Amino acid sequence: MTIKEVTNYLEEIAPLEQAEDFDNVGLLIGDYNSEVSGILVTLDTLEETVEKAISENCNLIVSFHPIIFSGLKKINGNSYVERVVLKAIQNNIAIYATHTALDNSKVGVSAKMCEVLGLTNQRILIPKEDQNVGMGMIGELNEPMSEDDFLKRTKVIFNSECIRFSKKTGKLIHKVAVLGGSGSFAISNAISEKADVYISADFKYHDFFKAEEKIMLIDVGHYESEQFTKNLLAEYLTKKFTSFAVILSKKSTNPIYYL
């Protein structure tokens, strides 16, 4: 089984052409014709991720976030990005990233958020020309909940050390919008779709004013909102490929700590 055969399958789920223009997705390091000995699935590719791949005899890392994003002019090991690239090349380990290609998939990042929240009647929050492709999702709870109960439940589900939220509206929560990662750009979409709450990450101070008591905004944290993505990728790959090991990295790569 070659790397190309694996990436062809990944691109059925998350076609590279549906990634955002600013992004850097696909095979970042490696040769498509190399035979796969094993796959390590991760959210981020760090030095310890490459070391884990080496120890598990995995020569392909499937990562959500791209380790090479804005380009490299030198590879001298002076930054964590350069050290990861060097270590991967020196050990013949390929790295593939899905990022916004998977964000825009109807079975991708936001769909997984809907799944863990138990939402039904799911649809894309910001559809592109093709209605089956786009950012974010919106769905419904089977039973409406109070804002306090929903906040507590959300904190537990996303295993967040700290959640930030806008002023409560006093309404029951029924319709829920979600978007993994930095999602402040979709606040107006969540409001126009009459969502009772919008869960995402990386909201700035002034973003919370945009709620205008029409919606409750919840910032669960960037890592926390995307943490289930690696499970999603591992599930797809494990079902498809049985001739080699697909290993899920259980190590948290969250760079943020709380006190």
Image (cartoon, rainbow, N blue to C red):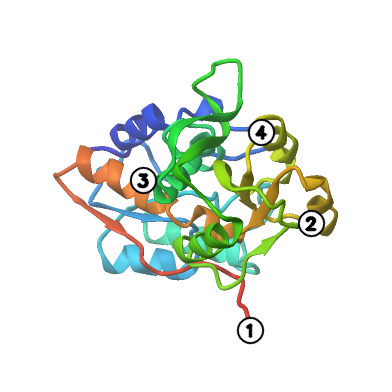
> Mark 3 or mark 1, which is nearer the start of the sequence?
3
Kindly check if marks 4 and 2 are in contact, taking CB atoms under 8 A apart as contact: no
Task: Measure the alpha-carbon separation of dots 3 and 4.
Answer: 31 Å
Residue 69: where, in percent of width, then height? 63, 48
Which label sits in the foreground, 2 or 3? 2
Kindly check if marks 3 and 4 are in contact, taking CB atoms under 8 A apart as contact: no
Task: Measure the alpha-carbon separation of dots 1 and 2.
Answer: 20 Å
> Mark 2 or mark 1, which is nearer the start of the sequence?
2
> Mark 3 or mark 2, which is nearer the start of the sequence?
2
Label 3: which residue? 233
From this viewpoint, is residue 240 visible? yes
Residue 4 image-quadrant placement: top left
Task: Measure the alpha-carbon separation of dots 1 and 4.
Answer: 35 Å
> Mark 4 or mark 1, which is nearer the start of the sequence?
4
Label 2: which residue? 204
Give the camera-side residue of 57 and 43.
43
Residue 138: where, in percent of width, then height? 54, 35
Residue found at the far left of this picture = 243
Task: Measure the alpha-carbon separation of dots 2 and 3.
Answer: 30 Å
Label 1: which residue? 259
Label 4: which residue? 194
User: What secondary structure is found at the residue carrying circle 1?
Assistant: loop
**Amino acid type for the residue under numbered disc 4:** Lys
**Amino acid type for the residue under numbered disc 2:** Lys
User: What secondary structure is found at the residue carrying circle 2?
Assistant: loop
Quadrant location, the N terminus:
top left
